[in-house]
Image (cartoon, rainbow, N blue to C red):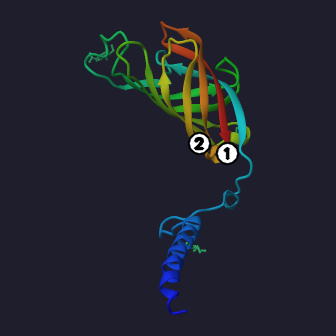
Amino acid sequence: MAKNLPKVTPTFLILFTILSFSTFSATGKNHSFSRTLSPAKLGLKREKLSHLHFYFHDAVGGRNPTAVRVAEAPMTNTSSTSFGGVLVMDDPLTEQPELSSKLVGRAQGIYASASQSEVGLLMALNFAFMEGKYNGSTLSVLGRNTILSAVRELPIVGGSGLFRFARGYAHARTYTFDEKAQNAIVEYNVYVFHY
Ligand SMILES: *[C@@H]1O[C@H](CO)[C@@H](O)[C@H](O)[C@H]1NC(C)=O
Ligand SMILES: *[C@@H]1O[C@H](CO)[C@@H](O)[C@H](O)[C@H]1NC(C)=O
Ligand SMILES: *[C@@H]1O[C@H](CO)[C@@H](O)[C@H](O)[C@H]1NC(C)=O
């Protein structure tokens, strides 16, 4: 018995260490500022996929502009791609291509000319919805918009309200562009996963 003890003890100790380590890993470490939570605690049920379709009205010119230039580089005016120009927008989103059709929300944010070789915008904005059950909910967009391409894809990086935990993408297609007035109507198809 006494002879066997030294042989058993190291084996037992190793086993004990492995077992307690895996138990600890499974429950995870508790921190004073974070903890793991079951999705049900936040009322999250099944994730769903939604498709939203609307028209975006961007008016840089005219009497009531909805996008205003707030910054530029000395070269912006002479650059063929307006490189360095930064605009802030508060653009209406409507159900139909006509501006007079039902307002579903507004696109609020910034776009900047971020390419020297083509017209390529960095877009950082929120779609703030104002219609029906989505009133008060938002989707956040951060992406690249080469406005002369037929279809541009912009990532949806998050959302709020009914769009909490949202992720997905938007396809933008220019519907009309009035070069003289610098006004554009863009059709948006947005696909998002959310709860
Ligand atoms: C972490 O904290 C929770 C709640 O305070 C407790 O139930 C759980 O046992 C703790 N887990 C560990 C590994 O300490
Ligand atoms: C660029 O053009 C705009 C409008 O014509 C003008 O207001 C602005 O001062 C110009 N900026 C520079 C840096 O030349
Ligand atoms: C959206 O919500 C705001 C604030 O709660 C409210 O004033 C407004 O009437 C609502 N709009 C629609 C179209 O329901």
Q: Quadrant of the rendered structure where residue 116 is?
A: top left
* Residue at the image position 62 percent from the left and 27 percent from the top: 93
Q: Secondary structure at mark 2?
A: strand
* Residue at the image position 41 percent from the left and 12 percent from the top: 118
Apparent side of residue 149 relative to residue 115 in the rendered image (left or right) = right
Foreground of the two, 18 or 177:
18
**Residue 87 location (% of width, % of height):** 41, 26
From this viewpoint, which residue is outermost toward the top?
A: 180
Asked if residue 77 is positioned above or below residue 103 in the image, the reply reads above
* Residue 102, label in figure: none
**Residue 150 location (% of width, % of height):** 57, 12
From this viewpoint, which residue is outermost toward the left?
A: 74
Residue of label 2: 159
Instruction: Please say if the residues under marks 2 and 1 sit with CB atoms less than 8 Å apart.
Output: yes
Bin the neighbour count of mark 2 within 10 Å (Cα to Cα): few under 14, some 14-19, many 20 and up. Answer: many
Q: Quadrant of the rendered structure where residue 96 is?
A: top right
**Residue 21 location (% of width, % of height):** 52, 70
* Residue at the image position 44 percent from the left and 22 percent from the top: 121
Residue of label 1: 162
Asked if residue 62 is positioned above or below residue 13 in the image, the reply reads above
Bin the neighbour count of mark 1 within 10 Å (Cα to Cα): few under 14, some 14-19, many 20 and up. Answer: some
Foreground of the two, 20 or 1:
1
Q: Secondary structure at mark 1?
A: helix
Specify the quarter for ligand 1.
bottom right
- Quadrant of the rendering where the N terminus is positioned: bottom right
Which amino acid is tagged 1?
Answer: Leu
Question: Would you say the beta carbon of the disc 2 residue lies within 8 angstroms of ligand 3?
Answer: no
Measured Cα–Cα span from mark 2 to mark 1: 8 Å
Asked if residue 58 is positioned above or below residue 37 in the image, the reply reads above
Apparent side of residue 54 relative to residue 17 in the rendered image (left or right) = right
Foreground of the two, 169 or 91:
169
Asked if residue 77 is positioned above or below residue 160 in the image, the reply reads above
